[in-house]
Amino acid sequence: MIRCVRAGRVARVAAIGALGALVGVVGVLGVSGCSSGIVHLSHDEFERLPRDSRQEIFDAENDLVIARNRQDDAVERKEKTEQSIDELEQRWKRADKRLNASGQGARSSQARRVFDAQKVYLESEVEVAQATITTSEEGTELSRARLQLVRGRQLARIGRVTVASLKPLEEKLASIDTRVKASSAAETTLRVRAQAQLDAWKAAQDSYARSTGDYDTAVLGD
């Protein structure tokens, strides 16, 4: 079986059909600069692990890479939304100029309400994007802690550490998980608010279009 995940923007593929196919996966994240505090197995120790244990480590590493990709995506979404606000300002200037040039300047204030509603919506989406960044950062830390614990459990399995020594890792994981849940809840609240702002913008569009018949300006920024 082949599993693929993105590392940065590059696909990382690892074959796991044969027993030796996962050799060298351990420490991949350390090579990429993510090794701080992460428990490592030596090559020989990894070789001695059962296939299921190798798969568990591989899955935990993949989860971390996926979490980091989500974090990158969240940052990108925020930047794009902020750019949309800047572009909307320019579109409004062109629309306002067109209305005045065509003798429809009286509609400008009503059209401006459509613009303002869309801007408020986009600003709420920026808040959502920032909350998503926070949640994804916590998620990355959670995946890193899980990987740390998975590796620690394998070390305990081969007798290099005691099971009792894993308790701090388990407590750390539980603490981060609590933070992730809190961040997710805050993000959900902001998403509900953004949806309300989206509805308000669409209502402003419909109101303007119905009262003026000017559908071009009504869809300003769509």
Image (spheres, grey):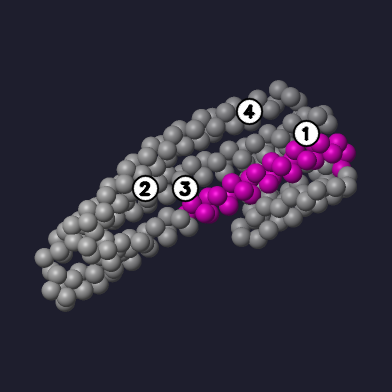
Q: CA distance from mark 4 to mark 3?
A: 25 Å
Of the two numbered discs 1 and 2 in the rendering, the one whose residue sits closer to the viewer: 2
Name the amino acid, label 1: Gln
Residue identified by numbered label 1: 154
**Which label is found at residue 127?**
2
Q: CA distance from mark 3 to mark 2?
A: 10 Å
Q: Position of residue 185 (x, y in %)?
A: 44, 34
Residue 33 vertical placement versus 162 (above, below): below
In terms of secondary structure, where does tag 4 sit? helix
**Towards the viewer: 182 or 24:** 182
In terms of secondary structure, where does tag 1 sit? helix
In terms of secondary structure, where does tag 3 sit? helix
Name the amino acid, label 4: Glu
Q: CA distance from mark 1 to mark 2?
A: 41 Å
Q: CA distance from mark 3 to mark 1?
A: 32 Å
* Dot 4 or dot 3, earlier in sequence: 3
Residue identified by numbered label 4: 170
* Dot 2 or dot 4, earlier in sequence: 2
Was residue 159 drawn as part of the magenta stretch in this picture? Answer: no
**Towards the viewer: 210 or 28:** 210
Residue identified by numbered label 3: 133
Q: Position of residue 164 (x, y in %)?
A: 71, 22
- Whether residue 146 sits left or right of residue 179 in the image: it is right
* Residue with the most extreme top position: 164
Name the amino acid, label 3: Ile
Which region of the structure is painted magenta? 47-75
Of the two numbered discs 3 and 1 in the rendering, the one whose residue sits closer to the viewer: 3
* Dot 4 or dot 1, earlier in sequence: 1
